[in-house]
Image: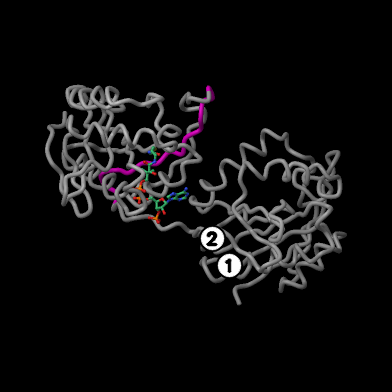
Amino acid sequence: MFTPEVISTGPVRLRLPREDDADAITRAFTDPLITRFIAGAPVPYVRDDALAFVKTAAQSWDLGGAQFAVADPETDEWLGGAGLKPVDGQGTYSIGYLVAPWARGRGVASAAARALTEWAFEHGAARMELLADIENVASQRVAHAAGFQREGVRRGWEPRRDGLRHDMAAFARLSGDAGHPIRPYLPFLPGGSLTDGVVRLTPITVADATGFHEMLSDPDVQKYHVPPEAPPFDDLVARCRKTGMWWLAGERAEMAVLDAGTGEFAGHIQLAQVLPGLGQAMLGYSLLAAFRGRGFATRAVNLLIRWTFEHTELARVIAGTDPGNAASHRVLERTGFAREALLRDFLPGPGGVRKDDLQWVHLRP
Ligand SMILES: CC(C)(COP(=O)(O)OP(=O)(O)OC[C@H]1O[C@@H](n2cnc3c(N)ncnc32)[C@H](O)[C@@H]1OP(=O)(O)O)[C@@H](O)C(=O)NCCC(=O)NCCS
């Protein structure tokens, strides 16, 4: 059982929520991100909801949890909230937090999560869990900044306002962990995209799913796709929702190739099968038929390769092509890849046959 106290650390002060925080709490809870990612937050949120929350926060301590206001250390102004729920009787707690829109982007949540976690460890907690919606990348970055390691995905964890049970990215920090901030193996794109003025690469989103599905339904793309059929549209939407989570986890970087002039979806490019231990990742790309033959693939690969060797520690980017895919061979030759090996019967093809795969490599220049 925790006892309420004030935790002061650098950029934040954790103290008990008070009735005079109610106006700030009410204003914060009109924010669409809080409505989206805090399950159970009343909509619309009125001052009485904030007053009720202050009361519940006081009671949470008697139930074995803890609920703090995250306050400005200078002015004591309410900036957000952070709390703990006991998960079991074995010393595992679950941490939650939110920051008012006007206090975001300056490390408030990361400092609060770290302070609360380390305080709980000092008071006997053994394991701290943190669950963030798979699309809540800001919260997942907070987890890394506070020293939490990613453990996987809890599927269909929580029913949300949209009536669906959402998948959650699961993180945990143990009392014995060093707790250093975790630096992503794949950094995000500088400024959010890469462009040479003709094509633009952006992390692929649900808004790209229609173009992505159209492209994967093209028999000329399916011929070289693994597995050799288009996934159902809903599977692609689910995949696009995970882009930020996979990127942050260092598992893969999936991008839409856009026409820089019009913003139209032209294709897809990715670094997948990222193996940090080997310093190797695999490149893959495809274009919609209307955008082929215009140098888009060469431009997209050039942009991605330059970013890879400037911003990541990868030493080898490999690519695999069908031995008969002359257009793709041309793209790889033009962008500095060299042929490396022929892997026989490497890939599953249509109708249960196996297909050879010509492997290429681009070494760190
Ligand atoms: C998640 C939340 C608490 C973050 O608060 P914050 O004080 O801005 O967090 P921090 O400044 O400590 O760190 C946020 C990180 O996310 C990044 N970020 C912010 N918005 C982002 C976005 N849309 N996509 C990717 N990263 C984003 C920031 O750049 C920062 O990373 P950096 O420190 O590496 O630059 C805040 O956005 C919030 O209250 N959201 C609504 C409620 C919520 O989601 N709570 C968590 C539920 S699990």
Image position, residue 298 (x, y; %): 74, 67
Taking 303 as reference, is 2 left or right?
Answer: left
Around disc 2, counting alpha carbons within 10 Å, would you say few (fewer than 14), some (14 to 19), or many (20 or more)? some
Q: Quadrant of the C terminus?
A: bottom right
Asked if the magenta segment contains residue 174, the reply would be yes
Residue occupying the point 17% across, 50% down? 73
At label 1, the amino acid type is Trp
**Closer to the camera, 175 or 187?**
187
* Residue annotated with mark 2: 189
* Residue annotated with mark 1: 307
Label 2 SS:
loop
Q: Ligand 1 near label 2 (Cβ, under 8 Å)?
A: no
Q: How far separated are the C-alphas under marks 2 and 1?
A: 8 Å
* Quarter of the image where one finds residue 184: bottom left
Asked if 9 appears above or below 1 in the picture, the reply is below
Q: Quadrant of the N terminus?
A: top left
Task: Give the mark nearest the N terminus, 2 or 1.
Answer: 2
**Closer to the camera, 35 or 210?**
35
Q: Which residues are magenta?
A: 163-177
Residue occupying the point 77% across, 40% down? 230
At label 2, the amino acid type is Leu
Query: How would you classify the magenta stretch by its main secondary structure?
Result: strand
**Closer to the camera, 340 or 65?**
65
Residue occupying the point 26% across, 25% down? 53
Q: Ligand 1 near label 1 (Cβ, under 8 Å)?
A: no
Q: Is the C-beta separation of discs 2 and 1 under 8 Å?
A: yes
Image position, residue 4 (x, y; %): 13, 33
